[in-house]
């Protein structure tokens, strides 16, 4: 399996055909491809123009915005959708989407709207949500809480990575990378080798031939990230 073949497959599938659980992997795959093409414009011959990639990200953002507004969505899922929608703004700068995401984010972490931040979960998605809140609002408490979540991961969870589902480890590594990029607090070098290793393990356990679109999007995310790492 290689990125070029999978990219063609993914690009032929309408965004609306992907289940909500596949959108995060799909988004991060396209963000990685966008970064690859932006730095290496000659690769537009392989992946299409930056505009084409941009449009796919816009479509994903639209799906995420609709999910955020759905009251039936479970809280932890909503946290992930909000974190992803805010992340799309870094590539696709649409203030309407950002306003939706920020309003939803503070509805989650400060439901009383009194300035007090309370975390209903401490997931990698919550870490990314807090990082984005800090990036867009400058609220130091968000940065502090994001750091707390990352430190918990490093001190406890990372020691048991062999016992964890590889997709979960992948999400934590993504959150750690996002934290270091946004908060700009380089406590240690990002373990790109770890991402490559976990990515390989994750790919080995996914069966793309079964046409499970969540698996397809996860493969796309991993392969695109690995390609971006290799080109850095």
Image (cartoon, rainbow, N blue to C red):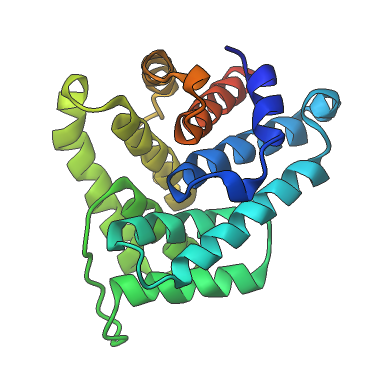
Q: Position of residue 143 (x, y in %)?
A: 35, 59
Indicate left or right for 22 with 79 as reference.
right
Indicate left or right for 211 with 191 as reference.
right
Q: Position of residue 123 (x, y in %)?
A: 27, 49
Looking at the picture, does residue 162 appear above or below residue 149?
above
What residue occupies the far front of the structure in this picture? 210
The C terminus sits in image quarter: top right
Q: Position of residue 154 (x, y in %)?
A: 22, 35
Identify the residue shown where x is 25% and y is 27%. Answer: 165
Q: Nearer the viewer, residue 74 or 188?
A: 74
Q: Nearer the viewer, residue 205 or 155?
A: 205
Identify the residue shown where x is 78% and y is 27%. Answer: 40
Identify the residue shown where x is 43% and y is 65%. Answer: 133
Looking at the picture, does residue 71 appear above or below residue 195?
below
Residue 131 in sight from this viewpoint: no
Looking at the picture, does residue 140 appear above or below residue 194?
below
């Amino acid at each position: 399996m290689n990125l070029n073949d999978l990219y063609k497959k993914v690009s032929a599938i309408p965004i609306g055909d992907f289940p909500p659980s596949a959108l995060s992997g799909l988004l991060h795959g396209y963000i990685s491809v966008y970064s690859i093409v932006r730095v290496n414009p000659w690769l537009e011959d392989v992946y299409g123009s930056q505009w084409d990639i941009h449009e796919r990200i816009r479509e994903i953002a639209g799906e995420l915005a609709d999910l955020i507004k759905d009251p039936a969505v479970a809280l932890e899922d909503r946290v992930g959708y909000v974190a992803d929608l805010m992340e799309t703004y870094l590539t696709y700068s649409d203030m309407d989407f950002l306003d939706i995401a920020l309003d939803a984010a503070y509805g989650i972490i400060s439901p009383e709207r009194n300035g007090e931040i309370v975390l209903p979960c401490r997931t990698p998605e919550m870490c990314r949500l807090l990082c984005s809140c800090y990036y867009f609002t400058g609220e130091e408490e968000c940065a502090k809480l994001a750091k707390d979540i990352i430190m918990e991961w490093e001190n406890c969870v990372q020691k048991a990575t062999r016992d964890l589902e590889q997709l979960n480890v992948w999400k934590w590594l993504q959150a750690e990378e996002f934290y270091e990029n946004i908060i700009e607090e380089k406590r240690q070098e990002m373990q790109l080798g770890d991402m490559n290793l976990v990515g390989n393990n994750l790919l080995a356990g996914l069966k793309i031939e079964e046409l499970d679109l969540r698996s397809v999007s996860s493969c796309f995310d991993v392969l695109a990230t690995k390609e971006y790492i290799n080109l850095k």
